[in-house]
Amino acid sequence: MADQTFRVVLTGGGSGGHTYPLIAVAEALRDRASKLQFQLDLTYLGPNDTYAALFKNAGITVSFVVAGKIRRYLSLENFTDVPKFFVGFFQALWKLYFIMPDVIFSKGGTGAFPVVLAGWFYRIPVVVHDSDAKPGLTNVASSFFAKRIFVSFDAASKYFDPNITSRTGVPVRHALFANPTTKELAKETLGFDPAKPLLLVLGGSQGAEHINNFILENLAPIMKETQVLHQAGPLNFAEVKRLSDAALLEISFANRYDAVAYLDDKNMSLALTAADLAVSRAGSTALFELAAFGVPAILIPHGGSNGHQRMNAYDFTKNGAGVVIEEPNFLPGIFLSEMRKIISNVELQKTMSAAAKQFFVANSAEVIVDGILEAAAK
């Protein structure tokens, strides 16, 4: 392979949960290419959404196809998205003809299936990774054309051919581990008191309005117990900042609260290191990042998304890594009771942290790269 260029097309989109693992695998592919001394060409082929810039920033060539969502349910949007699928398929056929990759790696999500189907037409090997305990319809459909399938949760394995399926967890970006530090120093670097507990509030890459509003409505009792680092999401940040500034004027005690729109890799690494407890949705990427750093969590799974967040949350917490509060029960009395129980008990935090770390799968991206290279070689 040293005298040839190994071409990989990455596909998948629609959320950070699809995008960040693709970038993590791209990083691992580059490391492998450097180690084995072969030329590597990476192209992202997917929807032109807000996440496409992340591929450009990672030095990956970007090309777009029209994306239509595959749904399990009846919706008027199917009437517009079905034609989009066929447009995307013919675009993918055209673009793959000129790229002609050695392998396609799909994370599923919006826009991935037309690329997978076009790849099958050219007999290009396909490798699929699904992040959730209940796989998305795109990956279930794509699995019929796949040489290798990787899943993040054991529960997802039953949906795929066991002969080509294995569990790898979710690939986590190298950048999160680039500058290890201590919990105390991480708190201090972020501007918090290293001697006091810190609650990290995560709503996903875009923020979660329900969680944001709940934290703001209960800021005073929360801050009696802990400092708060609140990732509000870019779409909601201005409103969260306005409301939190007003709320803080009425709080007389000195615990620190800080709202941010977004945590880049460097600051996310610091936040995960510093956190004594996290409040989060149950997207798979968030769960595996929490697990990588051993952060105990109170999980509020999203009620939609075909129930996959609920399944993710219970799988993550079954060995004691966290607790689940479902949205109908996401009430001040229940939440504050659970938060106080964890934030005030250092030994419980240590036990939960150890359980979270056991959930994490190390070297996930490297194992997927092994599968990509094996699929291409067959």
Image (cartoon, rainbow, N blue to C red):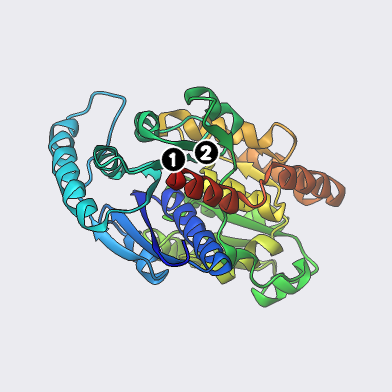
Three-letter code, disc 2: Phe
Q: Secondary structure at mark 2?
A: strand
Which quadrant holds residue 57? bottom left
The foreground one among 90 and 82 is 90
Q: Are marks 2 and 1 in contact (CB under 8 Å)?
A: yes
The x, y position of residue 151, in whole percent, is 53, 37
The foreground one among 196 and 269 is 269
The foreground one among 142 and 319 is 142
Q: Determine whether, in the image, residue 238 is placed left or right of residue 94.
A: right
The C terminus lies in quadrant: top left
Q: Residue at x 46, y 29 (%)?
A: 307
Three-letter code, disc 1: Val
Q: Residue at x 52, y 54 (%)?
A: 216
The x, y position of residue 360, in whole percent, is 67, 46
Q: Give the residue pinned by disc 2.
A: 150
The x, y position of residue 265, in whole percent, is 54, 67
Q: Residue at x 39, y 45 (%)?
A: 106
**Furthest-front residue in this view:** 3
Q: Give the residue pinned by disc 1.
A: 128
Which quadrant holds residue 355? top right
Q: Residues within 10 Å of mark 2 (few under 14, many from 20)?
A: many
The x, y position of residue 296, in whole percent, is 71, 47
Give the mark nearer the N terminus: 2 vs 1. Answer: 1
Can I make out residue 250 in this image? no
3D distance between C-alphas at marks 2 and 1: 6 Å
Decide: is 221 above or below 238.
Answer: above
The foreground one among 10 and 253 is 10
Q: Residue at x 73, y 48 (%)?
A: 357
